[in-house]
Every structure is written in structure tokens, then in C-alpha cells.
Amino acid sequence: MEPRTESLKDVLSGRVLLICHHNADPDAVCSAHAVKELLETMDSSITAEIVLTGGASRLSRRVIEALDIDVAEEASGEDADAFVVLDSATLSQLNDWGRKISASNAPVVFIDHHAPHPEIIQLGALRYIDEGSTSTCEVVHGLFEAFGVEPSANAARALLVGMAFDSKHFTMGTAKTFKTVSKLLEIDGSVEDAIALLKSEVGRSERIARLKAAQRMRIHSVEDWTVATSHVSSFQASAARALLVLGGDMAIVAGENKGKVKVSLRSTAGFCRETSIHLGRDVAMPLGQEFAGAGSGHASSAGVNAKGNVQHMLGRAVELVAQRLREHNGPL
């Protein structure tokens, strides 16, 4: 990604709403916090507000309090001069705000590190998307450098926390990732502090969800890979990670709540590397489209929000994985 700073300056002015996806995670919240500082530093006429379109995760609430991040649960978008959508690959992740943004004449900027859904590309918005970055916070730091602005100590700490969260406590990343970490540490903070802020005990409900997922697990042998599927009503992402720990090469966990089905997909680093399957682009996106919803994500971590039968969606997800594996392996 080569940031086009002049284009960004041209489209942003006045009241800018920084939009985070529903159940915002630390990467979304921290990147929004840093972007707010960047925009208001580069143009004193800009007033930026962080909007949580569907609340924030429990962990994000702790980060918000620790870093004194000012967020709004509700806001009016009618008089917004521009929107900046962060860490969101589809408009469906924004609840009612997706519709509001689509219907608005105000310019929209997307800052993200996921493979974008076609609807975002069709929107014709200004996009700063780098799938090679491990987090949106890493992308945002690139914008700071492009503008020649040094983050404050608080913003540097926020960027570091967001990067730590999405890189699984810095167990994954590129040379660029760790160069960025080094630059942020020179400003303020420590890796230990960032990781400590993100540590939390797994609650009883989440532990039970993991156990139920294991109890209900079905094992599929797909082209010599082990794909585990299961269903729980909540904590699908945590359950999927647990199934990988149990021995799955890939895990797909779905659950229904209030008529909507959520699917979480996870794979090991070895599965991702050797199969070249991108869970977000190759599985989550087509699955979401097929079941009247939307899907997105990373190569080894993705999610779908849609409507349908849980078992049908799990079965179809396995079929999509099998299809991609056959394409990858080619004819014998």
C-alpha cells in the first residue's frame, strides 16, 4: 500500500465519524483512536468521533478505559462530513451504519488489512488496505509516517496494543511489522505492558462453549487434511481455536442467535502455508454470499454472518474447502 496522502486531505474535513465494526476488538478501537489523533493533528478544523456500531468486546472495554479512549455508542450520521471505516471488510459488520454509509453522499475512507468485500470496492471509496499487514494499527502507523506525523505517547501505546492483539501477542508478523513495533517502542511503552493489558482469564461461559464444541465435534478427512466442525450458540471463534489445539488442521464452528448464524473459521499456519487457501477470500466470502450475508477475514482466520441452517452452512463450508483443495492439488 502506498498511502495517497493528498487524496485523504482532499476528502476529509469538518465532522468525521470513525466507524468501528460491531463488537469492536482492540485493533479496531486502537486504530480509530490513533486515526482521530492523526486527523485532528493534520487539520485543526477536523473534529473526529469514534463510533462503536455494535458495542465493544470485554477486552476492548478494558483497553478503552486504560488508554482513556473517547468513544460513542450512538451518534447521528446525518450531518457527518465524512466517514472513516476501520478494520471492517464488509458493510454488514457495521449493523445499521452500513446502510447509512451507503446512502450518504459524504465521502467514505476505508482503512483495513482484510481482503475487501466487492461491495466496498463498488462503493468507489478511498481505500487504504494492506493485506500484508497483520493489523489495521500497522496500516495506520504507515499513514502517520506518510504524513510525517509522530504519534503521541498515548497513540503509540494504542497502536502497539492493537498490533499485539491481532498478531497474537507478536507470534506472527513480517519484517515490516517488527520494524513498526520498534519505532513505536522508541516513542513510548513496552511489549510487556501491551501484552499484559490484553491478558484475561477465560470465563466459565467461554470454557463451557469450548467443551460443548469438542463434545459435538465432527471430524472430516479432506484431501489428507483434518477439518473439524462443530456448533455452539456463542464464543464460536474461541471454540474454533480450541479445536485446532485438539488437533484439527482447520476448524469451522457455527452458531445461531436471534435468527442469524455466525460462523468462525480458523486454520493452522501449516495448513495456510501448504494449501494456499485464504479463508477470508476463498471460503468466508462465497459462504456469506450464498447464505444471504457476508463473510471476510484473513488467510488463517475468518468469519461469516448470514442466515440459514447451521448444519447446512457447516456442510457447505467443508465443501468449499474441499473444492479449493482439489483445485490446489490439481489432477493426479
Image (cartoon, helix red, strand yellow):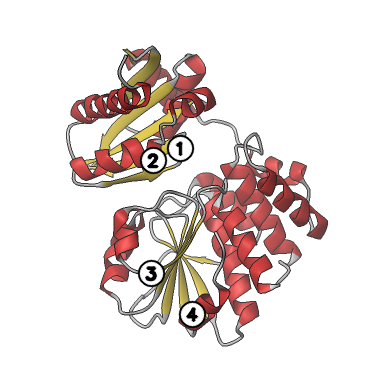
Corner quadrant of residue 145: bottom right
Find the distance from the CA under tag 1 to the CA under tag 4: 31 Å
Q: Are marks 2 and 1 in contact (CB under 8 Å)?
A: yes
Amino acid type of the residue that numbered disc 4 sits on in the rendered structure: Leu
- Residue positioned 57% across, 63% down in the render: 2
Name the disc covering residue 229, or none: none
Q: Are marks 4 and 3 in contact (CB under 8 Å)?
A: no
Mark nearer the N terminus (4 vs 3): 4
Q: Quadrant of the C terminus?
A: top left
Mark nearer the N terminus (2 vs 3): 3
Find the distance from the CA under tag 2 to the CA under tag 4: 30 Å
Residue under label 4, please give it: 12
Badge 1 marks a residue whose secondary structure is: loop
Q: Is residue 125 visible?
A: yes
Mark nearer the N terminus (2 vs 4): 4
Relative horizontal placement of residue 14, taking residue 104 as reference (left or right): right
Which mark lies nearer to you, 4 or 3? 3
- Residue positioned 66% across, 39% down in the render: 170
Residue under label 1, please give it: 299
Q: How many marks?
A: 4
Q: Is residue 326 above or below residue 193?
A: above
- Residue positioned 71% across, 59% down in the render: 156
Name the disc covering residue 125, or none: 3
